[in-house]
Amino acid sequence: MPGRTTPTSPRGIARHGRLRRRGPVRPLLTLVAGGLAVVLVSGASVAAIAVRSATSEVSTVVLGNEDTVQDVRISEITGGANILLVGTDVRAADSQIDAGTTDGARNDVTILVHLSEDHSQMSAVSFPRDMIVSVPDCTGPDGTYYPAESRVQFNTTLDRGGLSCTVSTVESITGLAIPYASAITFDGVIEMSNALGGVDVCVAQQITDTDSGLDLSPGTHSLQGVDALAFLRTRHGVGDGSDLARISSQQVFLSAMMRQILSVGTLSNPATLYKLASAALSNMELSSTLNSPDTLVQLAYAARDLSPAEIVFVQYPVVDDPYDSNRVVASEADAATLNAALAADTKFTVGDESNGRASVAQDPSAAPSAPASPSTPAADAEAAPTAPATEAPVSTLPSTISGQTAAEETCSVGNG
């Protein structure tokens, strides 16, 4: 939007540049779906980090009777975790955004976050809102019973039976158990981006959306507030104007936001951490399993060593609905491959040419960054023999499954 962004020329950065930074604690889900996803658990994890950051600065006094106190240690959660993050189109009455005309709350963005058993990878799977699915029977928050039904548009599941109905539907689609869930409103996304002071997003081709007023020229723009939300919600202004193009553009934003939140500058700034935590948690609904400081800290601690390269954004694979050209259905073969990889806890990545419908690499010709070589010990140093470290193999998903890692610096492609 005019006057709210600062365009610069796109930077030539390697598509696969690795940005590993090891720190004491990493936010578990900096994912904002609609880009919100990342926000949801991101917000929860930031809250945990904020608590740890604050208590680490408190002065202590030795009383002399410490041996009478039971030793209490913070530990990471055992094994992996599946968390569903939902971005809703609910807005406060005094919100800065147009309330729209649609009745009820819809899951505008839905992302399944899978933390691997060994905590070495986080996958964020976006489900298209226009996907036609079968919905299991659900009981809404008010006790209303909804029988199972086939051919339901996915983004109506939240209004149909609340957050638990959306969770049950994704469990049915993927075959995974999802014990944790969280929902965030549009207002939360606005406040999160404001707390960060804006998210730098690359635009490769003019984005013009008359519905939202979004108008971005090619270059890099710092987006926050209603501008950030407009970018995350636009579909007609990017790619082919579809919901799938919007998911692709959202992943550009989410990856940039992830890199920014995981940066040393953000994690070392208590004021920013508290702003992020407050912005997210004041606009979130948590499942009872997630609404615990202990759980939040354990999840955040489990993901403390994740780098952007180990966070993978994937769009759930779909094809055109044979009965409705304006809708999509799951691509059976590709969906089975992705579901199996998640169920088996397989570490995976997407192919080099697997950008979505509305994103491109900032520098497609640049070679991937080579991993850092281990330091060589001095010639006269006597090192004890050690067994070679074994890492789980990384599989590459079929090229028909689109996505990117948070380390890949990509640009959104408009159609203006």
Image: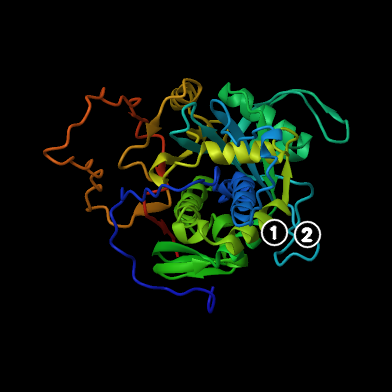
Closer-to-camera residue (158/273): 273
Q: Secondary structure at mark 1?
A: helix
The image quadrant where one finds the C terminus is: bottom left
Q: Which mark is residue 92?
A: 2
Q: Is residue 196 visible?
A: yes
342 on left or right of 88:
left
The image quadrant where one finds the N terminus is: bottom right
Residue at the bottom extreme, as displayed = 3
Q: How many marks?
A: 2
241 on left or right of 347:
right
Q: How is the image coloured?
A: rainbow
Q: Position of residue 340 (x, y in %)?
A: 47, 21
Residue 298: image quadrant is top right
- Residue beneath disc 1: 187
Residue at image location 69% in from the left, 32% down from the top: 70
Instruction: Name the kind of residue labelled 2 in the image.
Output: Ala
Residue 130: image quadrant is top right
Residue at image location 44% in from the left, 40% down from the top: 312
Q: Is residue 212 visible?
A: no
Residue at image location 59% in from the left, 25% down from the top: 173
Closer-to-camera residue (82/274): 274
Q: Position of residue 279 (x, y in %)?
A: 67, 58
Residue at image location 49% in from the left, 42% down from the top: 304
Closer-to-camera residue (24/303): 24
Q: Secondary structure at mark 2?
A: loop
Question: Which is more N-terminal, label 2 or label 1?
Answer: 2
